[in-house]
Amino acid sequence: MLSKHKSLWALGAALWVLSAPAQAQAQELDQITQEGGSNDPLLDIALEDLLVLESTSVAKKRQNVRDSAAAVYVISQEEIRNTPGGTIPDLLRRVPGLEVGEIANGATAVSIRGFNGRNSNSLLVMVDGRTIYVSTLSGVFWDQLNLPLQDIERIEVVRGPGATLWGANAVNGVINIITKHSGETLGARAHARLGNRNQEAALSYGARLGDNATLRAHGSYGRDEGLQSIDGEDLGTATNSGELGLRLDWEPTERDTYTLQADLSAGSGDSTTIRIDPFLVDPTPIEVVTQTKYTAANVLARWRRQQSDDLNWSVQAYYSHIHREELGFFDLQWSIADVDFGANWRPNETHDINFGINGRAIWDDFSTIEPNITFQREENTDLWISGYIQDDISLIQDTLRLTIGAKLERNNFTGFEFQPGVRIFYRPDENIGVWAAATRAVRTPSRFERDADLQFVAAPAFSRTNPSPLTLFPTLLGSQDLESENVTAFEGGFRADLAPKWNFDVAAYYNLYENLNQPTAISANPVFIPGVPFPVSIDADVQFQSRGVTDTWGVEAVLKGEIASWWQTQLSYSHFNFKKGIDPTTGTPFTGFLALKGSPKHQAAFTNNFQIGSSLALNTQLRYVDSLLGGQVPSYFAGDVQLRYEAPNGLDVSLIGENLFEDRRLEFLQDSYPAPASFNPRSVSLELRYRF
């Protein structure tokens, strides 16, 4: 009897580990399914200028987006200004192929081309080249990203692997948020937003320090009232956050540029979680309001030098520290020190070479508060060293270009990682561009995957996640033997200027993933008690192992143009699909496919920007997002609008409405711990911007 059900116990343990956070949401999800002329220089930017924006994230050098052999989208200053949403994740919703969903207060799922979740581990995010990807949990704390939007120059989004230049964890994409040079923000600027859901204020001031230096200082504060229950009830959650920062730019000579940036931020917020005693059989869930609080500090210094007409180089160093206590689950202190040297050399008209080296140290101290979570080591240090080289080879001048490169990294837990790439770009005429690429990228295992031991709540017999006849007590174990996940990606794209002021861009991809980390049942032991001749329960150990494989594929397209001098429009669509993976050693399904179900199969967006006279602007955004998690999160349409009055004295006044089509909507489910489903409510706000 025991032998007959051992495989059922093992399968049940693995499924239970993956679906535990969703158990507490099941009742709510059933209910959801049943209910089914200005003084602003930005205004002088012509559409043709927006269509030839430059990017530095694809090739680590300034390059026209139209000439990039990658799927790249640049969110410009004008698009930032015209987007109704007030956060960086809101801005990212307009990018084709990018997945954004609010999970709970202070938690947002952001990913590119699959694997979306609370900790989207395949996306590298940077601010001015400084990573904000936290390796301990393999993800980004989006609630800690409090940059004033008025200080952002542009946001570069590269869809697809970027590891050849940026290294490990740039698996499915790279987001680089680039702030403005302080010389572009002289004077004072104030911003305030008051609404039924959030309130925020920001003030920045830029000044000259002599003839060759400029300084900008900023401060910001924000409060978010939080999400709601399915019935529109307040979940008792709200977040408060603030940031102080400065940027100094000094150009003592025509060849040298020095930059110093520093910021300090802090925040706290309440969230509703569901607490379950993992040592009880079929326990009663209890909703508890707990708090997350954090402090973070960053300092970055950079020296760029134009050595000659053919050679320029830069040296950058930064240090970041985070202290975060999350919802009574853990207390994390995480620090990173990074030194980078990069150069661009053009020895002749044929070759354009980028090369560089990097050293990095990461320290963390991860202590747990809940008794069912322990770490094999509370403190840890990871060391990295890497080098890269990439050559843009002009095969036919201004027509055909081949790019080959590779990055070699060495870390102290997975060893050497080799990440090569080859790209080709062909321009048959000045209005058409065609490109293709084949690349390899890796994601290194997080500290949690390597070191954590987690006792999950008991799974009752014959339940959805435990088909066996005995109650299951699963424990998830970390593994020091994990390998890096890797992807081999094949991409291609087509760009065309269809007509004056009209641009079309489409990209397609096929990704092959190997060594995906998945919870795998390694033991299922019956538990006996004295006097009872048969087992009363099962203790099952489930361990992260590098055994999963899967394929993903999709297409992304965007059409942008100007219908009239006062009417600009953009239409985008993306499709994502995947093959249910298997464990090649056992032939069993790869349970990590649940993460892929967190990505919508179809997404579409339609934005319109109307300039009504010299002082009035109307901006609208309509989006469709397909259902997630097998229909547990329904598909939805979202409509946002911004009406802005631009006064001649430097004052802008905007009336903004978000989520106008329904009272509230569900965008994602908490996948890190049990929590009630949280709904994004309709909101109305008044925004003021003043330059003086």
Image (cartoon, rainbow, N blue to C red):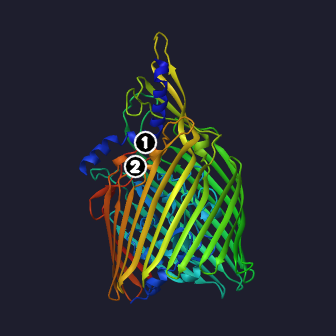
Q: Secondary structure at mark 1?
A: helix
**Along the line of sight, which residue is nearer the eye, 186 or 29?**
29
**Along the line of sight, which residue is nearer the eye, 454 or 489?**
489
Q: Which percent across, then down, holds residue 60?
A: 63, 71
On the image, which quarter does residue 65 sit in?
Answer: bottom right
Residue 289 vertical position relative to residue 267 in the rendered view, above or below: above
**Along the line of sight, which residue is nearer the eye, 524 or 48?**
48
Q: Is residue 128 visible?
A: no
* Label 2 packing within 10 angstroms: few (<14), some (14-19), many (20+): many
Residue named by callout 1: 21
Q: Which percent across, then down, holds residue 532?
A: 45, 11
* Label 1 packing within 10 angstroms: few (<14), some (14-19), many (20+): many
Q: Is residue 645 visible?
A: yes
Residue named by callout 2: 669
Mark 2 is on which residue type? Leu
In the displayed structure image, the side of residue 642 where residue 315 appears, left or right: right
In the displayed structure image, the side of residue 440 where residue 218 appears, left or right: left
* Labelled pair 1, 2 in contact (Cβ < 8 Å): yes
Q: Secondary structure at mark 2?
A: loop
Mark 1 is on which residue type? Pro
Q: Earlier in the sequence, mark 1 or mark 2?
A: 1
Residue 40 vertical position relative to residue 472 in the rendered view, above or below: below
| Cα distance in 3D space between marks 1 and 2 | 9 Å
Identified at 51% across, 70% down, the residue is 155
Count of numbered marks: 2
Identified at 63% across, 62% down, the residue is 421
Q: Residue furthest top?
A: 531
